[in-house]
Image (cartoon, helix red, strand yellow):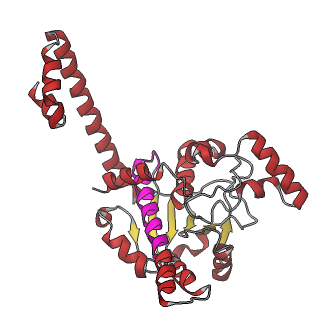
Amino acid sequence: MCVAARECGTSDYLLVVKHLETLSPEELAELAAQRQATKEERREQKQAQAANKAAALASPYSVVIDCAFGELMVRFCSCTRPLPSAPAMTSLTAQGTGENKSLMQQFAICYASNARAAVPARLCFTGLGGDLAERYDRYSGTDKWPVVRSGGSYLDVFAERRQSLVYLTADSPHELAELRADDVYIIGGIVDRNKHKGVTLKKAEQEGIRHARLPLQANMRLTGSAVLTVNQVLDILLAWLELRDWRAACERAVPPRKRAAEGEAERLGRKARRSGKSAAAAAAGREADVPAPQEDDDDGEEEEEAAEQDAE
């Protein structure tokens, strides 16, 4: 009785005690059994998460988040338009570092999703440097994350597996059919906001590595303004590893508010045909170039809290 009361806030203490006093011995016994079952369930969940964390580094599936764009975002905000004054420079640079802050939050969600996944991946953060690296190191719990962290390029981390590298980019003409254990999949760590179009495809081509786009076009439609974040792209990959079905993976990983309704999808299709583009291209947009989270991303705070709890 006292234990149950202590777990409530101070203002509710007397109410809890009064309620417990009204229960029969059988009801109290049932309540105690429920509490014990809940404790055991939480213990099992923690054990499962711990096992997943340990298994992640040994996973045959590798996913890289390319963090080498961190300074690009800062430089872009500082240098792509005339700056009338020093305060303007400060504002634009802050916008770039703000994008790095948003990206770091997405990294935390990626880690938490991978820790909970039925089939976790070997998660690698490469190209960490500058402001983004400082944010990564300051973020609570990152020193305990079972991930590969490197300031070097994925070309160095996977030097002996260069032929296995596959950069995921919406601009690629090649559609990804399945995830293979002998390949390494790269997600561009960019908070895009449509400012860095084509940069991931260009990078893959310059480095001479393979590239592919997620098969979203045949499996779902996004609203015209919807874009996917780094963690949402990873969630699709993790869902596919469990379900082995792209449509089911998209339905699980992409928030409903970002999916176009049937009428909206038809409207986008007609608009795309008129402009000479495929309906899928108009609806899906830039799915794997990892654009920015939308302003109405109301589930972001809950996911971030879950990430911080798992990082402890």
Residue 132 image-quadrant placement: bottom left
User: x, y (%) of residue 288?
Assistant: 63, 62
Q: Is residue 118 a member of the stretch shown in magenta? A: yes
Work out whether 137 lies above or below 277.
Answer: below
User: x, y (%) of residue 103?
Assistant: 47, 67
Q: Is residue 151 a member of the stretch shown in magenta? A: no
Q: Quadrant of the C terminus?
A: bottom left
Q: Quadrant of the N terminus?
A: top left
Write the residue at 50% across / 62% down. Answer: 62
Work out whether 206 lies above or below 109.
Answer: below
Visible residue check, residue 160: yes
* Viewer-closest of 36 and 78: 78
User: x, y (%) of residue 108?
Assistant: 40, 60
Q: Which residues are magenta?
A: 97-119
Residue 282 image-quadrant placement: bottom right
**Dominant secondary structure of the residues highlighted in magenta in the image:** helix
Work out whether 88 lies above or below 56.
Answer: below
Left or right: 67 with respect to 56? Answer: right
Write the residue at 42% across / 82% down. Answer: 130
Visible residue check, residue 244: no
Write the residue at 54% across / 49% down. Answer: 241
Write the residue at 18% across / 10% down. Answer: 26
User: x, y (%) of residue 193?
Assistant: 61, 68
* Residue sticking out furthest to the left: 2
